[in-house]
Structures are given as C-alpha cells and as structure tokens.
Amino acid sequence: MIQPYKLLLLACLITFSCSCKKLIEINPPTKTINTEKVFESPEMVDAALAGLYSQLITGIGSMTFSNGGFTIYSGMSSDELVNKNSTIDAEDYQFLSNKININNGVPGNGIWVPAYQIIYKANAIIEGINNSRSPNVTDSTRAQGIGEAKFVRAFCYFYLVNSFGDVPLVLTTDYTKTVLMERTPADGVYTQMISDLEDAKSKLGSDYAITNGERIRPNKWAATALLARVHLYVKHWEEAEKNATAVINAGQFTLLAEPEKVFLKNSREAIWQLMLNAINIQPGNVTWEGKNMVPLTRYTALDPSTQLLYQDPDFFPLLVPYLVPAYYLSDQQASAFEGGDKRKEKWTDSLPTPAIAPYNSMTYYFAFKYTEQESQVNGPMPQYYMVLRLAEQYLIRAEARAQLNNNAGAADDINIIRGRAGLANTTAGTREALLDAVAQERRVELFAEWGHRWLDLKRTQKADKVLSQLTYKQPWQTTQLLYPIPVKETSDNPHIIQNPGY
C-alpha cells in the first residue's frame, strides 16, 4: 500500500534541484582609481562604504571568505565539518583530509583575491577622503569613513594572516609600490591591525544611529570587539581583557536567554552583522551557511507518518540528496556537547538513518544557527549574517583572565556562557583547567562560525595533537596549518615565497 506514496513523493522531490554553490574565479582588482574627485559629498563616502559591505556579503554572487567560505573550509580543515560528497569532490576533500594541492582554487579565489580586493577598496576610501578638499565632506564624515575603512582593512588582514601566515601588507592603491611587495611578517601585520582598530575605535560612533538602529555597519564597539580578539591572538592578555570588558559593559549588548533568537537580524547579542542582498544575487535572503549546512528537507520538521516513509530502507537512499546537507557536523563536533546543552538542542538538527549500508543507523547532525535553507527573492529576511557577537567577548575575557591568574573572574565569565546554555557552573579551578574549560566553551558556542575552532587549535598549538589523531587526516602534515599562496601570486611576483610543504 505504501508504494504509490513513495512514487508520488519521489516525483515531487525530483522537481527540485539542490546544489552547493562553489567558490568561483574572481577578477583581479582594478589597478588605478582617481582618489582626488571621488569624495565630494557625504553621500559619496556612504556609497563607497556600502560597496565594501556589499562585497563582503555578496562578492559576485559566490561564496568567499567573508560570507560563508571561511566557516566551511576551515571547518573541514579542523575537526568540525564533513563534506557530504567526500572524495568525489576533490577540492573539498583536500580540506577535509588536510592534503591541499597547490593548484586548489579555494585559497586563492575564496580568500586571497577577495580579501585583497576589499583591502584595495578600503585603501582607496582612506586616500580619497584624505585627498578630498570638498567643504561638504565634514570632519565627522571624514572620521566615520576612515574609521570604517580601517576597520574593514584590519578585518580582512585578520583572515589573511591566519590563513597564509606572512602576507604582503598593502596600505596604498599605488600599484607601482605594491606590485613586487614581499610578504610582511605576521607580527607586523598584527601591529598594523591594532593600529587600524585603535584609530577606528577613536573615530567611530558608539551607537547604530547612522543605520537607523540596524547593526549592519561597524561602530566603536565592533572595532573594540575585534581589537580584543586580535590582542588575544598575540597574547596581550591585559589589552584583550580591557577591550572585551569595554564591550561587555557598553550597555548595548545582551546575551539572549533563548539561543534560537541569537542569529536574528538586529539581535541584541549582535555587535556587527552583514545585511544580505536578496535581489538577483545568490543565495538571496539566506546565508551561505543556511544554504550549505541545512538540508533542503528537514526530517525533524516532517509529521510522523512522513518520517516513517522516509525511513523506509527502499526509499531512504533516494532521499539522501534532500535530507543531508552539503556540509554536516563531524562525529567529534556532534559529541562535544554535554547532556542538556541548549546549544545542541537549538543550534543543531539531526537525521536518523535506517539500518542499511552504508548508513547503518547512524545519525547525521548539522548546524542550524542559520535556519533558512531556500530563499524567496521578495520573502522575509529573518536573519542577517552574524560577524561579531557578545558571547565571544565573554570567552575572550575568560581566557585572558585565566592567563592573568584571575581564576575567579575567568570562572565567572565561563559560567555566564554556560548558564545561557542551561548548564551548571564549571568545576574548573586551576589556571590550566580554566583554559581547557574556555576552549571547550568556545568549541560548542562558536562552532560553524568563522572558523573559530580551526583558528583556536592553531593559535593554542593544539592542532598537531588533535588533528593527527583523525584517521581521515593521515598521514598528518604540520605544514597544512597554513594554506598555499596562490600560484599566480608566486609566479607574478618573485618576492612572494610559497609556504613550506607546497
């Protein structure tokens, strides 16, 4: 009796198509720009800044480092995400296995090129404002424009230096000065980030008035939050604690009691979000994480009779493309949550499988922070893309306090995060135990967000120990902790030396 329903359901399903939008080649940036006549009014400055944020979230309609790509590819590089197509997709599998080929296009087309394109535009804005003699461009407009451009420049360099190590530090649009630049040591790049963010913090306003309350352009607190993160990465514990405390005490941000509301647009937990462009640009009014990490059909959203149908061993294999997302949580990540953790309940979803090979009653878990899979061009936009949020600041401060031997303060911050998740207070008491507790909370609080797990393993020098234990990453190679410099860069510029191991 069930067979006709199987056929009917299958016929409906195959009318839909589901594809993972891959990183595609991006044209190189323009080499010259007239910076003397660009900014003759505040509207021109705003338009140029809007172009920065548009490129961050949309690129050219493809997935890049700043709109989902870094989350996904660094998630596979660590122990966080698995690609559904396994070895069939060689480009993806090289990240999962940590065997990236020098000719893999993702590091170049997805990180290096788009980041430097945005840096070029940020530099052009800074130069254009500095060169403008228009009386219409007021001091406050100049400060706002330069502050935002420097913030975005620092933001891009953060992901460049953590992906490739030493990188060219480009602070001008003058092609003659940049065409043969050498790689700047990572310490020097971090120093510039700190300088840019300090300047941005001093220039930007402390509210969201310029966007009518929407948290879609960085303000003073976004600069302060990113500065706290940068100081944490370079082990400036006092500065990390100070800046994180400033954000926490700003009075504008709140840890929401209900985790499912954290990623809504203009969430009170958001420090900075990117607004999606729903018109004619992929993926529309959803994030790339929502498109690639959430299945086309969610099993748990089906009624019981339909679930029973989907679990039929004869039928289930036909439905896998619709029930399993392109990227799902690894066994290691899925098992990292404690019992009763509301983050697993609200920020993940799951799919049980029947007792047939190759599924063998396993359960797939996938990230569900971004809840929408498919978009409608003119439909509602419930979520923006979260870039910086308050929870990270508590965890930055907890780690900095533990490093400074303020054990009670570190425990307090950990407990705030655990309390929101419905968990009991930490039992950690020593500095080492507290640092382990912070690492655990970062793993389950910030999973599937901006590659935090990958970067945490690297900066704390735990990557070799953790990742070398995974069978699918054997034989483990430490050199894979940095991605390869794009071949075109090393061939065009003899001063740029390739990373070891490539």
Image: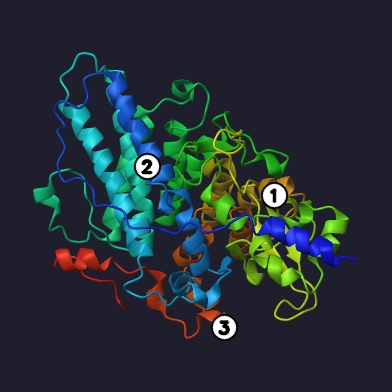
Amino acid type indicated by mark 3: Thr
Q: CA distance from mark 1 to mark 2?
A: 38 Å
Residue identifier under label 2: 55
In primary-sequence order, the first of circles 3 and 1 is 1
- Residue sitting nearer the eye, 327 or 97: 327
Amino acid type indicated by mark 2: Gln
Residue 312, quarter of picture = bottom right
In primary-sequence order, the first of circles 2 and 3 is 2
* Mark closer to the observer (2, 3): 2
Q: Secondary structure at mark 3?
A: helix
Q: Residue at x 45, y 53 (%)?
A: 232
Amino acid type indicated by mark 1: Asn
Residue identifier under label 3: 471
In primary-sequence order, the first of circles 1 and 2 is 2
Q: Secondary structure at mark 2?
A: helix
Q: Residue at x 36, y 63 (%)?
A: 107
Image location of residue 247, percent across then percent down: 52, 36
Q: Is there any visible trace of residue 427 in the rendered image?
A: no
Image location of residue 419, percent across then percent down: 73, 47
> Left of 147 or right of it: where is 496?
left
Residue found at the very far top of the displayed protein: 135
Image mark for residue 485:
none
Q: Residue at x 79, y 64 (%)?
A: 6
> Left of 390 or right of it: where is 429?
right
Q: Secondary structure at mark 1?
A: helix
Residue found at the very far left of the displayed protein: 176
Residue identifier under label 1: 415
* Mark closer to the observer (1, 2): 2
Instruction: Determine contact: label 3, label 1, CB under 8 Å.
Output: no
Residue found at the very far bottom of the displayed protein: 475
